[in-house]
Image (cartoon, grey):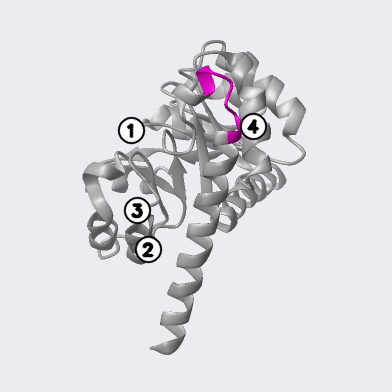
């Protein structure tokens, strides 16, 4: 029983951090050597929750190095995790949360078994139901550009209290619509980390984008809270 409680406290704490910080940087790059400067650029811009995708060459080694370098200042997770073995390797390398593009039961179970937070990707009510039933306390709505904010509103009916993190197509222009719809957090990819800029060593672009997203989200959340008080 003590072991179960310890694991629950572990991934519950990770969930709390994501819900508080709200912005998760989804890092896809062409070289593991780019991970460290990207992570530092994100921290400089105020985003300290970083998802290293398994599509990065040498992702496990890169994840281990990033965790060793900035793990005391950032929450590090793994993305595009497609099977139990990859999930276990990523968690062993330091990932505190594990994200998938779709709902994969063995990945959810691997995360739970190893004290990490599972964030499965969902595109349909059936996937949402499966993820919740298997114990995922948050689901990734992917691709958000296709599902749209109205999907979040509709899911609140059959799944009250559902925590969602829309990912894929979140921009400075549409993030407000997702905030208003009730999204709990946001996965930011190419609009935050421009691979073309990274290829020429422009890591400051990451910092600038991070600052803009943080400012926009802060203003939007403040406006929403004020509107709720006025009702």
| Mark 4 and mark 2: Cα distance apart in space | 28 Å
Residues under numbered marks 3 and 2 in contact, where contact means CB atoms less than 8 Å apart? no
- Does dot 4 land on a helix, a strand or a loop? helix
Closer to the observer: label 4 or label 3? 3
Q: In this figure, which residue is indicated by the disc labeled 4?
A: 39
| Mark 1 and mark 3: Cα distance apart in space | 26 Å
- Relative to the observer, which residue lies in front, 158 or 38? 38
Q: Which residues are magenta?
A: 198-204
Residue 102 numbered tag: 1
Residue 173 numbered tag: 3
- Does dot 3 land on a helix, a strand or a loop? loop
Q: Earlier in the sequence, mark 4 or mark 3?
A: 4
| Mark 1 and mark 2: Cα distance apart in space | 21 Å
Q: Earlier in the sequence, mark 4 or mark 2?
A: 4
- Image side of residue 99 versus residue 153, left or right: right
Residue 63 at x, y percent in the picture: 63, 22
Q: Is residue 92 visible?
A: no
Q: Earlier in the sequence, mark 1 or mark 4?
A: 4
Residue 71 at x, y percent in the picture: 73, 34
- Image side of residue 141 versus residue 97, left or right: left
Q: Earlier in the sequence, mark 3 or mark 2?
A: 3
Mark 1: few, some, or many residues within 10 Å (few <14, many ≥20)? many
Residue 182 numbered tag: 2
């Amino acid at each position: 029983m003590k072991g179960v409680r310890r694991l629950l406290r572990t991934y519950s704490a990770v969930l709390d951090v994501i819900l508080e910080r709200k912005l998760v940087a989804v890092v896809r790059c062409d070289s593991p050597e780019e991970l460290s400067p990207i992570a530092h650029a994100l921290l400089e811009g105020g985003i300290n929750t970083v998802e290293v995708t398994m599509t990065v060459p040498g992702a496990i080694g890169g994840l281990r190095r990033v965790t060793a370098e900035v793990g005391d200042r950032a929450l590090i997770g793994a993305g595009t995790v497609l099977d139990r073995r990859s999930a276990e390797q990523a968690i062993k390398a330091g990932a505190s949360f594990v994200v998938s593009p779709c709902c994969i039961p063995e990945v959810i179970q691997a995360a739970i078994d190893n004290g990490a937070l599972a964030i499965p990707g969902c595109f349909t009510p059936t996937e949402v139901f499966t993820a919740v039933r298997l114990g995922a306390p948050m689901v990734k709505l992917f691709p958000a550009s296709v599902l749209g904010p109205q999907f979040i509103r509709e899911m609140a009916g059959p799944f009250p209290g559902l925590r969602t993190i829309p990912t894929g197509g979140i921009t400075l222009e549409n993030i407000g619509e997702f905030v208003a719809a009730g999204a709990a957090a946001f996965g930011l990819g190419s609009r935050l980390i421009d691979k073309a800029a990274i290829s020429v060593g422009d890591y400051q672009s990451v910092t600038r984008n991070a600052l803009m997203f943080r400012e926009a989200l802060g203003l939007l959340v403040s406006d929403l809270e004020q509107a709720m008080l006025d009702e």
